[in-house]
């Protein structure tokens, strides 16, 4: 799942919740995604680290040594959007996992929720 939290000092935060729905633990992976909310080289990644970025493509990974247990979840936030995106573009457009061996694994259907106000969340699916 992804969610956009607006009105922060940097313009907003894109937060991801990755769930391991497999029977095996996974490690050494990174999360790759494209979005109109671009980040800068000084990105503030909470509970993760920036691997790389190019235009609207970002790659982030969990902290070194992190293992995502079966049924577990990893929540990571990107707090350094260069500009707050317009409402229709506050979403993750494409997202996938990059396995430890470099293989790209299609992610499950991700749900995006955009919080315009604390009282009224809206949900949209990544394409």
Image (cartoon, rainbow, N blue to C red):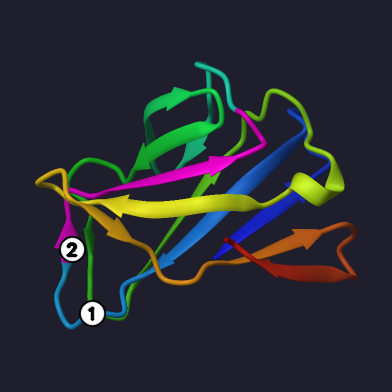
User: What residue is disc 1 on?
Assistant: 22
Give the quadrant of residue 125. Answer: bottom right
User: What residue is disc 2 on?
Assistant: 26
Would residue 41 appear left or right of 87 to someone viewing this image? Answer: left
Of residues 112 and 65, which is closer to you in this image?
Answer: 112
Q: In the image, what residue occupies the spot 66% across and 30% down?
A: 81
Give the quadrant of residue 26. Answer: bottom left
Give the extent of the magenta segment.
Answer: 26-38
- Decide: few, some or many residues near mark 2? Use Cα within 10 Å; few <14, some 14-19, many ≥20: some
Residue 47 visible in this rendered orientation of the protein: no
Would residue 72 appear left or right of 34 to someone viewing this image? Answer: left
Contact flag, marks 2 and 1 (Cβ < 8 Å): yes
Place of residue 116 in the rendered image (x, y in percent of width and height, measured from the top left)? 88, 57
Of residues 93 and 51, which is closer to you in this image?
Answer: 93
Residue 51: image tag: none
Residue 74 painted magenta? no
Residue 74 visible in this rendered orientation of the protein: yes
Would residue 105 appear left or right of 36 to someone viewing this image? Answer: left
């Amino acid at each position: 799942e992804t969610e956009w939290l607006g009105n922060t000092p940097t313009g907003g935060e894109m937060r991801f919740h990755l769930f391991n729905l497999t029977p095996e633990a996974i490690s050494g992976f990174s999360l790759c995604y494209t979005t109109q909310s671009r980040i800068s080289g000084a990105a503030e990644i909470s509970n993760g680290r920036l691997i790389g970025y190019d235009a609207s493509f970002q790659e982030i990974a969990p902290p070194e040594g992190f293992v995502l247990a079966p049924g577990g979840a990893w929540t990571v936030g990107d707090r350094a959007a260069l500009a707050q995106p317009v409402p229709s573009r506050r979403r993750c457009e494409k997202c996938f996992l990059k396995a430890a061996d470099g293989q790209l694994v299609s992610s499950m259907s991700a749900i995006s929720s955009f919080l315009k106000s604390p009282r009224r969340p809206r949900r949209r699916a990544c394409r």
